[in-house]
Image (spheres, grey):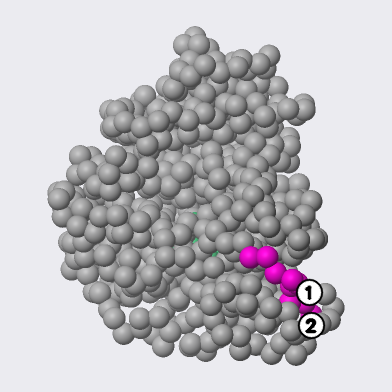
């Protein structure tokens, strides 16, 4: 913690609602005084309801909270229709392709494209509550598809394009999807890549899927199977009018699979009204999004950041969202800055891992471009280290922009802990304070608030509108995963899985996951999932995976492996290759093992539990300070240290 360094930014704009910390505190107090009333007021003011809700919050079946009970609303209507009167010709989406090609869709265009897609889905019998899986590149059709689902009440589940066929299959089966939407492929670093063959493989033996809608993006030859249909062909004849389905506040809007500390990925289920309220509100509060702003979030729509802060938030707030197909370092490390200059981007939102890479590849690149349009810079996904923060602030933001270090999760739907631009005095690498309405607290398991400098559990002690509603098909796991760790005043509260510390000024510093979840380039992965995959190799007797600090990716995958027969070690290189291939097959390219160490045994307690703390310490190259006397075989620690050397 770089506790005493403040970077009070020079104000180049006034936030309409939070000009200073007093206004922030007033809003926090308003929620403290009348929690439900304040949320109700915001929901009425910010959203367009088909029918008003009769109760703000129903806690009778906690932790299955219900918000804005019996309200009727439609998310695509929030994002499109209600803006048509004033913003028909305003750009809703600006898209830039890998090769620099540009397309602009106004709100009227978006209305038409979404409706056509909605009608296409309807023509295949998709109705309210059906699940539609998207396996898509970063092209505008992905956004149309998401909004089209929302329009007719279908539940979308977007699967990141970096996941393997196996991983895609698991998600399709778990959601029992009726439709899969994909593209033949797309472009990355000047080269075409394919998605459709992955879908073909994923769908082998899968019966629930009735149709596969294929957007022909890169015109590569693909195999057309019986259930495949061409979007490009069928979309032409669809009507551009489709009535928005009347949805209940609590109807599921989407599922998004994410990794937990144990078992299979979980289908995080989000709601309709509460989700869209917070998506819009945080766009206004945290990014100060104004109608004439061009806002750019570099995430992929396969992650929650892409859902809330490329699609739903900016559109609900009536802004212009920039969507980018390519990678920030292609054709060179000036690409991002060039795009900011060309599109006059006002808010730029990216991940620390990208900032570190851009810094490393071209520390002086930002200077070569006109970045004067920038007002707010955001980061998300992992703690940002002070050197990266400093470069972002000084070189990209030119000591002029506010940095918002936003802490949140797939499960929270939107930002939870973050500075408010122009109001919160910032400390580099610190997420600072909870947003008004969010009761984030660092406590122990019994709800006692931690003293400053004492690490505790980061919990949200009151329900909030955009929170996860359940895990799809497994409500028991939902309760256990999130409400089984900490209590406050005897009531189970939401535990994030992260540890955190208050500093002496009451600022919140996130210290990272305290469970067996690792964060590689801002991608969340369960060590259990990776272990289960490695375990499939016939030579592997036992495996334990931990995160190891990495200069660029934040954490890297470090695997300790016990072989059934250590004589195999002659073929080490081949074996490591084979292990990587298994993980690539089961999870995808995003789960690349960075270190493999073959060890004679794992450090286990007498009851057989692997002591991961020791393995984490060894991976970090730290001295072992823990007491190892409770281990079944303390000598194994020495042997592992030697193997790592
Ligand atoms: C985990 C959630 C939220 C969208 C991207 C990731 C870590 C997220 C920060 C931050 C420190 C952060 C946490 C969290 N995390 N933002 N600003 N500072 N850590 O979503 O895949 O659900 O991962 O990412 O560990 O629990 P996710």
To which quarter of the image does residue 644 belong? bottom right
Pinpoint residue 418: horizontal percent, then vertical percent. 41, 66
User: In this view, which residue lies farthest toward the right?
Assistant: 607
Compared to 83, does 449 lie above or below? below
Which residue in the protein does label 2 denote? 633
Q: Is residue 388 left or right of residue 153?
A: left
Front residue of this view, candidates 257 and 577: 577
Q: Which residue is mark 1?
A: 609
Residue ranking furthest to the top: 237
Q: Which residue appears at 65% of the width and 42% of the height?
A: 585
In the image, what residue occupies the spot 61% across and 89% down? 625
**How far apart are the alpha carbons under marks 1 and 2?**
12 Å
- Of the numbered discs 1 and 2, the one sitting upstream in the chain is 1
Nearest the viewer among 104 and 553 is 553
**Residue 149 horizontal/vertical position (percent):** 56, 31
Label 2 residue SS: loop
Which span is picked out in magenta? Answer: 597-605
Residue 139 highlighted magenta (yes or no): no
Judge whether 273 appears above or below 86 on screen: below
The residue lying at 57 percent from left, 62 percent from top is 595
Please identify the quarter of the rendering in which residue 55 is found: bottom right
Q: Quadrant of the C terminus?
A: bottom right
At 45% from the left and 23% from the top, the residue drawn is 217
Q: Main secondary structure of the magenta part?
A: loop
């Amino acid at each position: 913690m770089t506790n005493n360094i403040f970077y009070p930014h020079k104000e180049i704009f006034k936030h309409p609602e939070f000009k200073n910390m007093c206004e922030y505190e007033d809003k926090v107090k308003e929620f403290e005084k009348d929690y439900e009333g304040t949320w109700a007021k915001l929901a009425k003011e910010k959203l367009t309801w088909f029918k008003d809700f009769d109760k703000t919050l129903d806690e009778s079946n906690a932790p299955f909270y219900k918000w804005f009970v019996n309200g009727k609303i439609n998310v695509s209507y929030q994002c499109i229709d209600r803006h048509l009167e004033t913003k028909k010709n305003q750009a809703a989406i600006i898209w830039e392709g890998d090769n620099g090609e540009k397309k602009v869709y106004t709100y009227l265009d978006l209305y038409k494209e979404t409706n056509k897609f909605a009608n296409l889905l309807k023509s295949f019998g998709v109705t309210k509550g059906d699940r539609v899986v998207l396996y898509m590149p970063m092209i505008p059709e992905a956004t149309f598809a998401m909004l089209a689902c929302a329009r007719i009440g279908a539940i979308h589940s977007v699967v990141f394009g970096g996941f393997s066929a196996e991983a895609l299959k698991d998600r399709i089966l778990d959601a029992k999807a009726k439709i899969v939407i994909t593209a033949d492929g797309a472009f990355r670093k000047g080269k075409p890549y394919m998605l459709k063959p992955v879908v073909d493989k994923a769908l082998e033996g899968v019966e629930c899927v009735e149709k596969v809608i294929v957007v022909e993006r890169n015109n590569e030859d693909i195999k057309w199977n019986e259930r495949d249909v061409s979007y490009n062909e069928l979309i032409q004849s669809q009507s551009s009018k489709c009535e928005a389905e009347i949805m209940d506040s609590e109807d599921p809007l989407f599922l998004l699979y994410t990794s937990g500390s144990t078992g299979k990925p979980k289908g995080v289920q989000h709601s309709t009204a509460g989700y869209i309220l917070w998506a819009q509100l945080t766009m206004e509060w945290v990014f100060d999004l104004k109608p004439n702003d061009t806002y750019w979030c570099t995430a992929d729509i396969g992650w929650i950041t892409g859902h809330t802060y490329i699609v739903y938030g900016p559109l609900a707030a009536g802004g212009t969202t920039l969507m980018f197909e390519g990678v920030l370092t292609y054709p060179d490390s000036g690409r991002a800055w060039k795009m900011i200059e060309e599109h006059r981007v006002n808010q730029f939102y990216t991940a620390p891992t990208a900032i570190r890479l851009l810094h490393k590849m071209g520390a002086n690149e930002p200077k070569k471009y006109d970045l004067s349009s920038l007002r707010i810079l955001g980061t998300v996904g992992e703690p940002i280290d002070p050197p990266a923060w400093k470069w972002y602030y000084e070189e990209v933001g030119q000591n002029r922009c506010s940095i918002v270090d936003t802490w949140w999760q797939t499960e929270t739907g939107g930002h939870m802990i973050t500075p408010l631009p122009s109001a919160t005095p910032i400390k580099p690498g610190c997420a600072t304070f909870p947003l008004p309405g969010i009761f984030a607290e660092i406590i122990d398991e019994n709800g006692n608030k931690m003293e400053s400098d004492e690490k505790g559990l980061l919990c949200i002690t009151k329900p909030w509108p955009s929170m996860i509603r359940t895990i799809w098909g497994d409500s028991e796991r939902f309760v256990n995963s999130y409400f089984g760790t900490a209590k406050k005043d005897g009531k189970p509260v939401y535990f994030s899985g992260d540890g955190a510390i208050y500093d002496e000024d009451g600022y919140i510093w996130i210290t990272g996951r305290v469970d067996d979840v690792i964060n590689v380039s801002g991608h969340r992965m369960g060590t259990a999932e990776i272990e289960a995959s490695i375990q499939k190799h016939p030579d592997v007797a036992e495996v334990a995976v931990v995160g190891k600090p990495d200069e660029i990716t934040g954490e890297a995958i470090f695997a300790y492996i016990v072989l059934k027969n250590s004589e195999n070690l002659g073929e080490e290189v081949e074996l490591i290759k084979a292990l990587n291939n298994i993980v690539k097959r089961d999870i995808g390219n995003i789960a690349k093992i960075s270190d493999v160490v073959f060890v004679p045994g794992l450090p286990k307690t007498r009851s057989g539990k692997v002591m991961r703390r020791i393995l984490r310490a060894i991976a970090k190259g730290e001295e072992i300070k823990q007491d190892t006397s409770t281990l079944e075989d303390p000598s194994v620690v020495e042997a592992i240290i030697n193997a790592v050397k």
